[in-house]
Image (tube, rainbow, N blue to C red):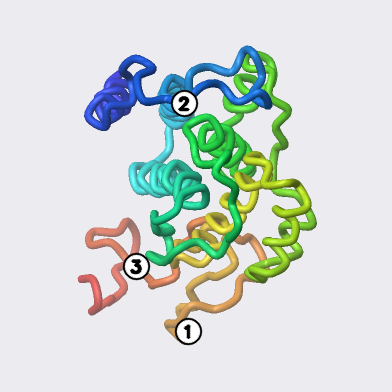
Amino acid sequence: MAMKNAFVLGLRALGLTGDTNGVSERDCNVPENFPNPLRAQQWLAEAVSYATAAANLETPIVIRLAHMTAACNWNCVAFQDDSALNALTEERPFLTGVPDTNKNSWSRALCLSQCYNSLREVTKFDVVNPILEEKWGLASQVGIRDDIVDCGADAACLQAIVEQSEFDPMVIGQVVAAEIQEFFDQDGWNSLGSLTFDPTTETAEKCTANCRPFADTTGYYPVNHPGPVKKRDKYN
């Protein structure tokens, strides 16, 4: 409950739980059951908040996931805006030619919804997809499309995919999610478990067996560790 209240208070502080003043008229491509964009963002935040609490995750992991979803929130604005900067690069997004019809709360909420669902394989927020499909009637894809993944960081390739979709906010949401996933895969947290600490060389080496996500790569050895004491001048 405390975590939910924190999300809700944060949303209120940002003015995201008020009435519909300032929200443009519903786009004709938005499903009838899709809520007001401000409510949509609030409900998604509450859903992932509950999912995080139910997963009993360690606090650092919770903070990392919060940063990922926050990047969805902001970059779905930045990619459909005339001046906002990319939260990850602190530069203007590469996407150009975005029509004015995309620069509204509805398009950004659709993008946000897809971004959350595209990151589900990373965040494990299984609560998102039922909300989008069953409650809101939104045809959303879990994960990221193969052609978007294949583009990697090739801006021209991603631009072509978005243009081919006629700047579909849901496709933009997948592009936003792909960039976020790539960024956080390389953020030094070893979230993929691709590295492990080698006590012989005292360096991080490629993991080849029994790899664990978020495994330590620094050789951390706590003080008062059970068993024989090993000198670790870096920490003891």
The answer for how far apart the CA atoms under marks 3 and 1 are is: 14 Å
Describe residue 140's horizontal placement relative to residue 108 as left or right. Answer: right
Q: Quadrant of the C terminus?
A: bottom left
Q: Quadrant of residue 117?
A: top right
Describe residue 113's horizontal placement relative to residue 5 as left or right. Answer: right
Decide: is 126 above or below 147.
above
Decide: is 28 above or below 210.
above
Mark 3 and mark 1 lie on one chain; the one further toward the N terminus is: 1
The answer for how far apart the CA atoms under marks 2 and 1 are is: 61 Å
Name the front one of labels 3 and 1.
Answer: 3
Mark 3 and mark 2 lie on one chain; the one further toward the N terminus is: 2
Mark 2 and mark 1 lie on one chain; the one further toward the N terminus is: 2
Q: Nearer the viewer, residue 82 or 204?
A: 82
Q: Secondary structure at mark 3?
A: loop
Outermost residue to the bottom = 201
Q: Residue at x 60, y 25 (%)?
A: 27
- What number is the disc on residue 24? 2
Residues at badges 3 and 1 in contact (C-beta under 8 Å)? no
Residue 99 point in image, percent of width and height = 59, 47
Which residue is identified by label 3? 220
Does any portion of residue 54 appear in the rendered image?
A: no
Residues at badges 3 and 2 in contact (C-beta under 8 Å)? no
- What number is the disc on residue 63? none
Q: Nearer the viewer, residue 162 or 1?
A: 162
Which residue is identified by label 1? 200
Name the front one of labels 3 and 2.
Answer: 2
Q: Secondary structure at mark 1?
A: loop
Query: Could you tell me the amino acid type at mark 2?
Result: Ser
Q: Quadrant of residue 22?
A: top left
